[in-house]
Image: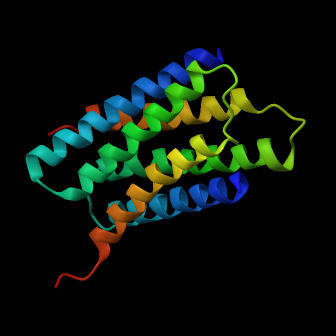
Amino acid sequence: MAAIIYSLCALTSLACFVFLWRTWRLGGHRLLFWSALCFALLTVNNVVLVVDKVMLPDADLKLWRLAVGFAAVMLLVVGLVWEED
Amino acid sequence: MEQILTGGIVAGSFVAGLFFFRFWRTTRDGFFLYFAGSFWIEGINRLALGLLPEASELSPVFYGLRVVAYGLIIVAIWQKNRPRA
């Protein structure tokens, strides 16, 4: 069940990335660009979570997962501060 | 190191949520409120995962919370893309 949920979370983040990136490319606010980067990394975070917990249960990728999650959130916060009007 | 990264993700998620909440207050666009809620829930989820030593992403409480957080993002995107009545 957890694998399905996290796979769906990965798909949701991917859809979010595509939606935000497309809107930014069509002339949207630059904040959309930072948000798109955040969701790209959150997609990686969820994929690595599935790989870590389900596909390779003996491997411990927790540090990598956390590092990617941290980078995702920090990119978003930097964008939110940087692009403030 | 893992705890530092977890703490960073928690703080970053709450800050990002606050920014989205402020955008909602300025624009009254529900899209931002859904995003704020999503990041706050994800922050609480990561906080609990960091505080509870035996916590695992595989337990239903944690992936259930992530479903709610990502569900809010899906609702936000759906509302933004639905045709205006």
Seen at 25% across and 51% down, the residue is B32
**Tally of numbered discs:** 0
* Coloring scheme used: rainbow
Above or below for B26 versus A21: above
- In the drawing, does residue B62 fall left or right of residue A79? right
Image location of residue A62, percent across then percent down? 72, 30
Name the residue nearer the viewer: A34 or B4.
Answer: B4
Image location of residue A7, percent across then percent down? 66, 58
Image location of residue B40, percent across then percent down? 37, 37
Seen at 78% across and 47% down, the residue is A51
In the picture, which quadrant includes the N terminus of chain B? top right
User: Quadrant of the rendered structure where residue B72 is?
Assistant: bottom left
Q: Is residue A29 visible?
A: no
Image location of residue B58, percent across then percent down? 70, 42
For this orientation, the residue located farthest to the right is A58
Seen at 29% across and 69% down, the residue is B79
In the picture, which quadrant includes the C terminus of chain B? bottom left
Q: Is residue A45 visible?
A: yes
- In the drawing, does residue B65 fall left or right of residue A2? left
Seen at 21% across and 57% down, the residue is B30
- In the drawing, does residue A43 fall left or right of residue A20? right
